[in-house]
Amino acid sequence: MQLKQEPQMLHSKINRQWWTKKKLSVLALSLILMHFLPLTSTDSRNRKLQIEESIVEDSIAATAPCLTALAKSDTQPRDAQLDKNEYLDFLNILTQGDYDGLDFEDLPLDLKTNYDNFAKGGQGFSCFGAQPAEAFLASEVQKQFLRDFCLKVNELLGNEVNRPITSAASATNEPLNRYVGGCLREKLKELGSDVIPKRRACNSHDSPEIIEQGLCEVSQFDYMEIRITPGNWDSANFYALIIQIILSELLFVPVSIDTGTGGELNFYDVNNGFGYNSVSHNYEALANSNKVADCRDYSDNTTCAHVFPEFWQAYQNSQLNYDEVEEVFNSMVGYLSWYVPKHVVEDDMTLMSYIGYFGKDNKEKLAKLFKRPTTWGDYCASKSNCTTKDDYASGPPGVEEKDLYFFEGDGEKYYTGFFNATERNDCTLNSDCTGHFVDYPCSWGAFTDQITHWNNVSLEHEKEYTYSELLQIFKAANATNSSIIATWWYPDSALEPYDYWSVSLPKATLECQSNRFLPKINRCSLNKTERLGNELGSCGYQSQSLSTLIANSVKKDFLQEVNEALRSPAYETLREIRVQSLDISAMLRNWTMDQRTDSSGYNAREAVCTWLADSYMSEDKSKSVKRFIPNTYPREFPATSWELKWYNYAAMIFGIIVLIAVLLITAAVHYYRSARIIRMAQPEFINLFALGYFMVCIAAILCAIMPTDATCIARQWLISLGYTQGMVPLLMKVSVINLLMNQAKKMKRFRVSKRSLYGYVIACTIIISAYLLAWTFIDPQSQSKEFKVISEGDEKGDQKNLVETEFYCASSSPIWIAVAVAWEAVFMLAAAVLSFQSRNVRSDMNESRELGRMAYIHLLFFIVRIIIALSQPVSMDIILSFLLSLDSLLSILLYTGPKIWGARKEKNSPPRSSCAASSLGTFHGPLAQSGVSGVKVVHCATCTCFNQNHQNSQTPASCINTVNRLHNKTAESCTMDSENGKDHEEETRAVGRKPSILRSRIMSALRSVPSSLNIAYNIENEEENGSERSKSS
């Protein structure tokens, strides 16, 4: 396929109006302007008055505001030339005085450069054709020149000429195109459907006014805008419109259509523009999209597109870099062929096949049947200048009309066309007679010369007709019931209004195709021998499976989006959209045959939208456009991006309950602080535990609410510091118990101070605080988002795909959280190991078992947290909240619960005596230092027995008797200094005892001590001067 050379000349729609309501005002303006314009003849004046509306429409309707400004500014003098002063007036008229009071040299540089470019260095440029009456006389080249000028000016001024809301709207300021808000939305309302789609997605061609009026919606998803560059023929345009509607309205993907300077084609254009691409196969645009992905990133006029909807591979494969695109079959089948009117076949059935054309026997028949089309000027030249109206011409043509093959306006045919039998058709006078073949340019991909020459077909074409001339000839043949034969392609709209039949040509073969010159330079060579090729390439045309070209940038955009919920459906949908040639042909037929409205662009939109609406409502899934939509699409965000749900409230309530429990336990410990069991557990330890779990509970509550940058930082601080405060004292206490037992077994004295305990806790707190501080400043945790698709049925039973947003906390690098987790792991594993080592500690010192249970609980919950984080790295905040709260509750209860219960029982019990160690003092006991002769041995520890009610102290007889039995000596009495309350130890000396015998006897004696006599250990409170009481034996 090849470019239509004149995209403004549109079939039977050339002379249709923009809109019905504008007729009277346009006609009035035309009459006023014509009053000041000299007319050359009475006949011409009358004809111009009769077809004034057609004249205005043919003067490039899409640029009406610009052309009006040009017409008004051409006053100094009125010579159809625009000089610099008039150019300045033109800009002020167009912008309503934005440049009033300025000289030409004061204009912005781009506007001055634009004038110089069009003036080409001269003193001005021609604006002929801007006046409505002049438009009739302006050549197609001049019309295109004015259009290019207006497009460029409006681009520089930012007026978006193809989408003006005010100038292209009615008095109510409503857009002319009733489908601006969406095809399916409007059409389904009209058809009474219960399902009304949302408004379409806005695209880069939509003006701010369109968005402000709510005619489109800015997509909730940051989808890349898909840009389409169709070929400049009708079926390609229709396919582009179908793609735009499906993506924009059913999937909410922004889509625009790029036609270069060929005019507006977007389905939602308020002016119903139906322009044709200025480039037939814009492969450069596809290549450019691979450089930037989103074409909106180009700030200049660089051509850019992602989709070429209708690709004829057999004729264009040498112009395309297949490495830059993906080719997808679109279900269309296209082909070229020779076409003749139906009445030709009815008169001679042999003309349905090449049999009726090939060979000398058919020469005279073809020459007689297919005559030469005649222009209006040539016809009148042979008919006394058409001074008398006849069946073919109503009068003589104007200057610009003489080369037309057909002309009509306002429902009247002024020249119906005429087909003349010239000398070339007379086989009596010319033995080399031929019939006339209506052929399009060689650059479009036809092989007419090669087929007719090598098959001895007596048909020839004297010229290659332009697209508008071909349309005129088709209309003329239909109006005069004349016989023509032409090369054309399917599907296309040009022949849809008429009944043309395809001629069956010799079957195409691979050998034939390989002997044809596909490059344009060969097909259009001036060298006849080269142009004709060889006989092996003289077969007919093969049918082609048409395809859609998708730039690699679309697939890249699809694959680069890591989050599946945010992926654009464009790539998958473009691969799935398939519209059969019969459907396209039906739309084209409805377009050309629809006479309900007078805007060609409106008719095209009506035809496309009607087909899509019928397909959308079809119960046959194989025919419904819904089959093109990928699974779990379309998607939308819920009304609220995040809200507290029942489990959030549950987690917060549970965290608050645990927090209150920690406070109550702390208060209970303080209340029972004088109880023996509390003092044995060291209240300082319990306070540190409570502080740590208090912080962890606050972190658990923060995990139950929506994460913010502040809460993300706060909860990580609370978790790390909380577990540090809780775990370090636990670790220290278990290690002290283990060390105590090891030293006791070795008969060694052991001492540890409170200062060392606090020192370890403070040191660990400083380390983790420094790390958290560095983390906060370098790469702080912040609110991050994760999206997932939730499919559910709505009240009508249709599937609704919601993209839910999950918020979570994260840093740029995962190393930070890994180190924090490792910090917790070290303490938890160490505590668990130490508690396991303490499993055999005698029941008299069973606190290690409670501490061990705490360590195991910590480790268990820690492992669960790690497993959940690895399996569900995003949606674990609620689970984490429950785990932190439950971990805190169980740990604090298991450790402090029995102690508080024991303290309560102790307080409520009757007074009794017990043997215990003071809360402070040097550790002594039966496990004492021993050695061989000359080594001092402590035989008896000070066992302070006190009556809880009277606070009396005495040395139990059992202790003294045990020592006496061991050493056969009488131990001196242990006395109590009533003044200062300190114990005074009486020591005995034993010499000559073997250590091994001594130890065994001591251990035997210890086992015989009643359970009520606990082996005491104490943590001595070091004096500030560092002095210690020395013991000697």
Image (spheres, helix red, strand yellow):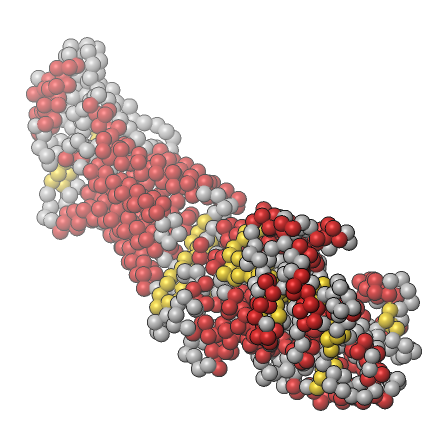
Q: Quadrant of the C terminus?
A: top left
In the image, taking residue 152 as reference, residue 208 lies left or right, namely left
Q: State the residue at coordinates (54%, 68%).
A: 584
Q: State the residue at coordinates (50%, 73%).
A: 611
| Foreground residue among 184 and 737 | 184
In the image, taking residue 328 as reference, residue 417 lies left or right, namely right
* x, y percent for residue 758: 36, 38
In the image, taking residue 529 as reference, residue 696 lies left or right, namely left
The answer to whether one can see residue 792 in this image is yes
| Foreground residue among 449 and 142 | 449
Q: Quadrant of residue 1022?
A: top left
* x, y percent for residue 618: 41, 73
Question: Can you say whether 499 is above or below 690 in the image?
Answer: below
The answer to whether one can see residue 244 in this image is no
| Foreground residue among 1000 and 456 | 456
* x, y percent for residue 716: 42, 48
Q: Quadrant of the N terminus?
A: bottom right
Q: State the residue at coordinates (52%, 55%).
A: 328
Question: Can you say whether 153 is above or below 55 in the image?
Answer: above
